[in-house]
Amino acid sequence: EADTVQMRELVQQTSTIQIVQTEGRPPKKYLLRFVMDGVVGINEDGSPRIGKEHLVEMVIHNDYPMSLPFIRFDTPIVHPNIFASGNVCMGWFRIPYELTDVCIHIAKMIDYQIYDLSSPADLRAADWAKTHSSLFPLAHWSLTGSTTDRKSVV
């Protein structure tokens, strides 16, 4: 129940993250909309195709919070740590965690503030990111709306 309250507070703090749908009480599944720039394709000249909305499914496991939720993009996304199927590789994450932390992490991934090139889920996206890192972050997204957050590259 505490996570449900925190998730509602999160979506009230920013127009970027929206809860589209939930299943369960308390919710065990969220469908989230991230309204922000994200790379949805790569043009032949290497320039990114930018999408403005991204749908993400987040399913909480029975052993929550000792394991991360299953996270999958339902809309196209190009990112080194997101498989072509849309499944997200979160990498290292502080456990236990809060669902709001996961949402903020996903937003920073979409913005290319966070990406790991050492063990990519999408080799093509990783190769592209290596040669286009000057484009990142895409919009300097942060929860507060400031443009001071910087990218994290491992």
Image (cartoon, helix red, strand yellow):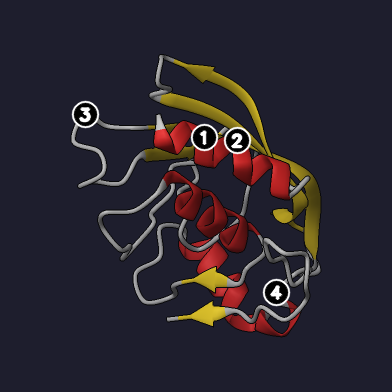
Q: Residue at x 71, y 42 (%)?
A: 12
Residue at the spot 30% in from the left edge and 46% down from the top edge: 68
Which amino acid lies under the numbered mark 3 shown in the image of this protein?
Asn
Tag 4: residue type? Pro
* Label whose residue precedes the other's in the sequence (3 or 2): 2
Q: Secondary structure at mark 1?
A: helix
Residue on which the image places disc 3: 62
Mark 4 vs 3, N-terminal side: 3
Q: Say if mark 1 contacts mark 3, CB within 8 Å.
A: no
150 left or right of 61 in image: right
Q: CA distance from mark 1 to mark 4?
A: 30 Å
Numbered mark located on residue 5 in the image: 1
Q: Is disc 4 in contact with disc 3, using a CB cutoff of under 8 Å?
A: no
* Local secondary structure at mark 4: loop
User: What residue sits 46% from the left and 51% below the top?
Assistant: 102
- Which is nearer the eye, 41 or 145? 145
Image quadrant for the N terminus? top left
Counting from the top left corner in percent of width and height, residue 122 is at 46, 58
> Which one is nearer the viewer's eye here, 122 or 153?
153
Q: Is residue 96 left or right of residue 79?
A: left
State how far apart marks 4 and 3 are (Cα). 34 Å
The amino acid pointed to by label 1 is Val
Quick one: SS at disc 3? loop
Label 2 belongs to which residue?
8
Q: Earlier in the sequence, mark 4 or mark 2?
A: 2
Kindly tell me whether residue 59 is visible in this rendering: yes
User: Residue 17 location, x and y as percent?
Assistant: 68, 43
In three-dimensional space, the C-alpha distance between marks 3 and 2, rounded to whole angstroms, equals 21 Å
Three-letter code for the amino acid on which mark 2 is drawn: Arg
- Residue identifier under label 4: 137
